[in-house]
Amino acid sequence: MNYQECIQACLECMEQCNRCFDECLKEDDVNMMAKCIRLNRECADVCAYAVQAMQRNSQFTKQICELCAQICEACAEECEQHGDHAQHCQDCAQACYRCAKLCREMAAA
């Protein structure tokens, strides 16, 4: 099974989540961004783990990719709520949705 496209999507999502996390911490009302910040961290972590699972051809890759898709979707939905005033949230949501789509395809394969 070729994981390369999904690995690339996970790496891009991780990068966008880390960027969004950092930018959210600079917001005037950080408390308003708390859920977004938490999901950014969780999403970046699960993306990194999914990459590792795919790279080592783990027997649990499908389950990990399914979990990654669920967390990516939750992060994307939260980021969309802030997208009107924060470009970094828009960018993060797009990367999360793409990653979720490819991870779901990987889980279904």
Image (cartoon, helix red, strand yellow):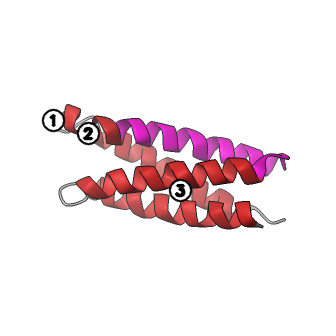
Q: Position of residue 5 (x, y in %)?
A: 67, 66
Secondary structure at badge 3 equals helix
For the residues bearing labels 3 and 2, Cβ distance under 8 angstroms: no
Element assignment for label 2: helix
Packing grade of label 3 (10 A; few <14, some 14-19, many >=20) is: some
Real-space CA distance between mark 3 and mark 2, rounded to the nearest whole angstrom: 21 Å
Q: Is residue 74 magenta?
A: no
Q: Mark number for residue 12?
A: 3
Q: Position of residue 8 (x, y in %)?
A: 63, 60
Q: Position of residue 85 (x, y in %)?
A: 18, 56
Q: Does the magenta portion include 45?
A: yes
Magenta residue span: 37-61
Which residue in the structure is indicated by mark 1? Answer: 29
Q: CA distance from mark 3 to mark 1?
A: 27 Å
Question: Circles 1 and 2: CB distance less than 8 Å?
Answer: yes
Residue farthest to the top? 31
Find disc 2 in the rendering and name its residue: 33
